[in-house]
Image: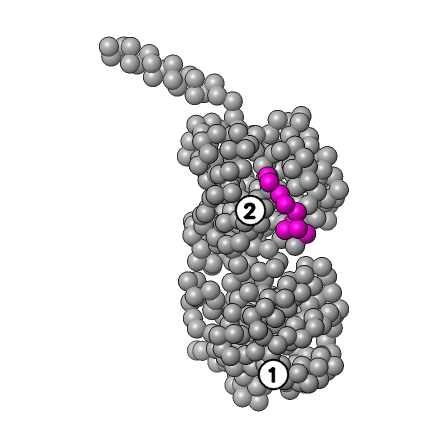
């Protein structure tokens, strides 16, 4: 009997080894203008592959990655995802880098009835399509103003002035914030669109004063946030609340020094984010790649973990059953929550809000992640005192 049992175990082991690997396909800019920015996405997928295989793979099968290069040209993604599906026989698909590429890839996946986990696409155009096989992991741009609006309402600031850098993502985030603010009963300005090198805010200050604006909310890059602070300081103007998306980036403090104090920023991801599994992810990523993960890396890792959870839930690679699993799945990722609406749009993840206090960025919203209460009103420039070395 003992010999029969040993033979059975040996046969089972050989059968397991004979199982073909599960191929996970994705298209990434591995060359061209976007390659450096997207490198974290590739690194995170490789890290996930290594971790998952070390834990037994998926459905008892080893995972292999098939990563194709679109040379930073989103137009190529239609052909390349069709190649992954048709020629390469990829079992599972993770979306490409950026919203434009994701729109192209999503169309290819829908056409072939193949599940695609959207790792990085945040533009609202993705939410306008009634997808059946595409599932979004990152927070959409429509949610980027949610924290600032919540803080303004809780603090009693009802008159808001909105600004956006002259680029599509910032304009979309600002436009959506305006719609949401109006729905909340807040008085909100038209979105003021400014060029990336704007430093003179005199006209905008006059417009804000005319409506007695209490809070400014700006969507843009770290340099835009710095330019805004420099501009309002030069005008000796300070609203009761100042939120600038780019103020969450460490470069903002480097650009303006102590003038960064009390500004708030919008944070979709940080290695210090107290989201579930983030500390372990950061340690593993730094050990593997000798650098801290950025947003693209976190998005890639979160997408892979969502896909992994769905496969385990479905217990199969059948695309319709996997689609049902992703539709019903509710979980936490390093980016925050994962839950989708009936068209695959993300409804659980929302960027955090941070505030610069004593030269450090601290999370002040949402409450479950907050490490300190927000400090408002934003003090006037005449009230400020230099921060000493012991502060």
**Where residue 9 sits: x, y (%)?**
34, 17
Q: Let me know if residue 261 appears in the view.
A: no
Asked whether 52 falls inside the magenta stretch, the response is no
Q: Which mark is residue 342?
A: 2
240 to 339, vertically: above or below = below
The span picked out in magenta is: 125-133
Q: Which quadrant: the N terminus? A: top left
Identify the residue at image location x=56%, y=55%. 139
Residue 251, quarter of the rendered image: bottom right
Q: Which mark is residue 109?
A: none
Question: In the shown orientation, is residue 31 left or right of residue 264?
Answer: right
Identify the residue at image location x=66%, y=83%. 211
329 to 244, vertically: above or below = above
Compare residues 168 and 47 and report the one nearer the observer.
168
Compare residues 24 and 146 and report the one nearer the observer.
146
Compare residues 111 and 243 and report the one nearer the observer.
111
Question: Seen from this angle, which residue lies furthest left?
Answer: 1
* Residue picked out by circle 1: 238
Identify the residue at image location x=58%, y=75%. 186
Which SS class for mark 1?
loop
168 to 65, vertically: above or below = below
**Where residue 74 sits: x, y (%)?**
72, 44
């Amino acid at each position: 009997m003992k010999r029969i049992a040993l033979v059975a175990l040996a046969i089972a082991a050989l059968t397991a080894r004979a199982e073909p690997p599960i191929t996970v396909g994705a298209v990434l800019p591995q060359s061209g203008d976007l390659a450096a920015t997207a490198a974290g996405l590739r690194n995170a997928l490789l890290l996930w592959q290594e971790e998952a295989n070390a834990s037994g793979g998926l459905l008892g099968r080893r995972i292999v990655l098939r990563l194709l290069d679109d040379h930073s040209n989103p137009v190529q993604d239609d052909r390349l995802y069709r190649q992954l599906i048709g020629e390469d026989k990829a079992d599972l698909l993770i979306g490409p880098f950026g919203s434009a590429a994701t729109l192209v890839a999503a169309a290819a996946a829908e056409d072939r009835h193949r599940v695609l986990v959207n790792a990085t696409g945040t533009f609202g155009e993705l939410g306008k399509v009634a997808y059946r096989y595409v599932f979004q992991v990152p927070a959409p741009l429509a949610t980027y103003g949610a924290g600032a609006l919540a803080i303004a309402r809780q603090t009693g600031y009802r008159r808001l002035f909105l600004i956006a850098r002259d680029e599509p993502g910032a304009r979309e985030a600002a436009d959506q914030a305006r719609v949401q603010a109006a729905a909340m009963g807040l008085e909100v300005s038209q979105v003021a669109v400014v060029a990336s090198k704007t430093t003179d805010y005199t006209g905008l200050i006059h417009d804000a004063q005319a409506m007695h604006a209490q809070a400014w909310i700006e969507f843009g890059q770290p340099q835009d946030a710095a330019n805004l602070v420099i501009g309002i300081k030069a005008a000796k103007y300070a609203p009761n609340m100042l939120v600038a998306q780019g103020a969450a980036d460490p470069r903002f403090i480097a650009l303006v020094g102590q003038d960064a104090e009390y500004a708030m920023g919008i944070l979709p991801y940080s290695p210090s984010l107290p989201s579930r599994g983030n500390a372990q992810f950061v340690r593993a990523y730094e050990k593997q790649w000798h650098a801290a993960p950025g947003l693209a890396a976190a998005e890639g890792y979160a997408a892979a973990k969502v896909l992994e959870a769905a496969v385990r839930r479905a217990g199969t690679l059948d695309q319709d059953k996997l689609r049902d699993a992703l539709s019903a799945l509710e979980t936490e990722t390093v980016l925050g929550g994962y839950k989708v609406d009936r068209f695959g749009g993300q409804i659980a993840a929302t960027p955090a809000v941070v505030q610069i206090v004593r030269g450090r960025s601290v999370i002040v919203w949402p409450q479950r992640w907050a490490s300190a209460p927000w400090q408002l009103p934003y003090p006037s420039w005449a009230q400020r005192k230099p921060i000493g070395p012991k502060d």
